[in-house]
Amino acid sequence: ALALLPRGENNSHCKHYQTRIQFASIEAIEKAGVDIAVVDQALVIEAINANGEIVYDQTHLAHLSSRVTGIVWQVCRQVGEQVHKGNILALIDATEVGKAKADLLQSIADLRLKQANLNRLQPLTSDGAVPGKQLRDAEAALQEAQIRLLSAGQTLTNLGMSVEPGQLDRLSMEQIAQQIQFLGLPPSLRDELERNPTSNLFPIRTPVDGVVVDCKIIPGESVDSAATILEVADLTRMWLMLDVRQEDASHISLGQPVLFQPSDTKGEDIKGTIAWISTETDDKTRTVKVRVDLPNADRKLRSNTFGTGRIVLREEPRATVIPTEAVHTDGDCNIVFVRDKNFFQAEAPKFFHIREVRLGVQEGMNTEIIAGLLPGEIIASKNSMVLESQLLKSNLGEGCACCAPHKK
């Protein structure tokens, strides 16, 4: 506790420990309403509090848009459905896709024609029946056709519909047309699509496992590449974004544990760890953004939920604690009234000793005591301000009928 943060110290000139408060009898104490508490040991967590918001893990959140302009042909998955990487979420009827497939077919046909022409000319050139220039022109035309085929194939690859031209060499043009009509679509959809002869369908696939958390499209709606139309999030992990005060930021570091309590629920704290600390301070709020990784295996956490996070600086499993109401201060030192160990012995005076204490962290209704008390000691707690007022009177040279200060 002393090494972590500066702690308040008592004034060395404070002499309250030389004084004790005496009651006339046990009945007088009860009449004054003074109750006692036992100095206890308990778990104390010293933490920095910060307001925060739960959001989706941005590294596992996919904002999906269509790479091509078109019309929504079919929405395959709806909000709330579990999906896996590669699943098709929607089909877009896009003219650009049909044109790219047609260009590929045209390039294959043109390449085959140029290859056949070169094959025809090569034996004739060796006999001198065809000039060498004509052969060279045929070879150049073949190379140009090969380049156009590669370009057409690359266009489809850029759309996520890869095709290997070499795999089509032994197929007829009709077979090739049938094969690329449903290029990029799984066999499970082809039976359904065979009744619709369009070649323009473009699939939108999810790049991550997760749940569809947003869907902004319906069949027949126009879409373009600038708009996000679907979102998929991995709900098994979430981010907590905390706003930490600038003056507290120097006490936090990566890997520190964090306890989060959503504002809409009252239950056990959700535990996470600091994964990122911003390198800048917000110029308006003067706070530092801190990101905490939160597990969400049961999927109970919801995005856009607000709450309070506690960044744990120190955890004392057996700290000395007392009720906060038992602690008093006169501005120079903190004191607690400790009952004399012989309090219940016959004819023994009914004393409360004044003990100077050094305080740690206040948590809930309890305050940590760093020095000055031992577990098991009996102190005045409820209505202990009666003893405090008597101490103040003694400093002014006054007394009272029920109790009186005595110098040790």
Image (spheres, grey):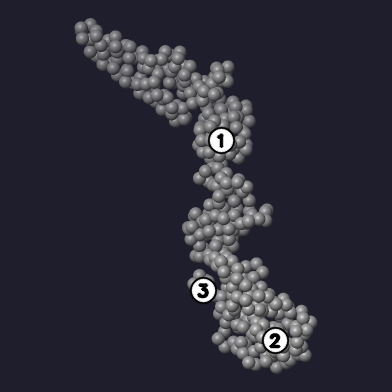
- Element type where label 1 sits in the image: strand
* Image coordinates for residue 363, horizontal then vertical, percent: 62, 68
Q: Is residue 326 above or below residue 277?
A: below
Q: CA distance from mark 1 to mark 2?
A: 76 Å
Label 1 packing within 10 angstroms: few (<14), some (14-19), many (20+): many
Residue 352 appears in the picture as rendered: no
In front of the other: 189 or 152: 189
- Element type where label 2 sits in the image: loop
**Residue topped by disc 2:** 345
- The answer to whether marks 1 and 3 mark residues whose Cβ atoms lie closer than 8 Å is no
Amino acid, disc 2: Gln
Label 3 packing within 10 angstroms: few (<14), some (14-19), many (20+): few
Amino acid, disc 3: Leu
* Image coordinates for residue 75, horizontal then vertical, percent: 60, 29
Amino acid, disc 1: Val
x 63%, y 30%: residue: 218
**Residue topped by disc 3:** 2
**Residue topped by disc 1:** 83
Q: CA distance from mark 1 to mark 3?
A: 52 Å
Query: Residue reaching furthest left?
Result: 127
* Image coordinates for residue 11, horizontal then vertical, percent: 57, 84
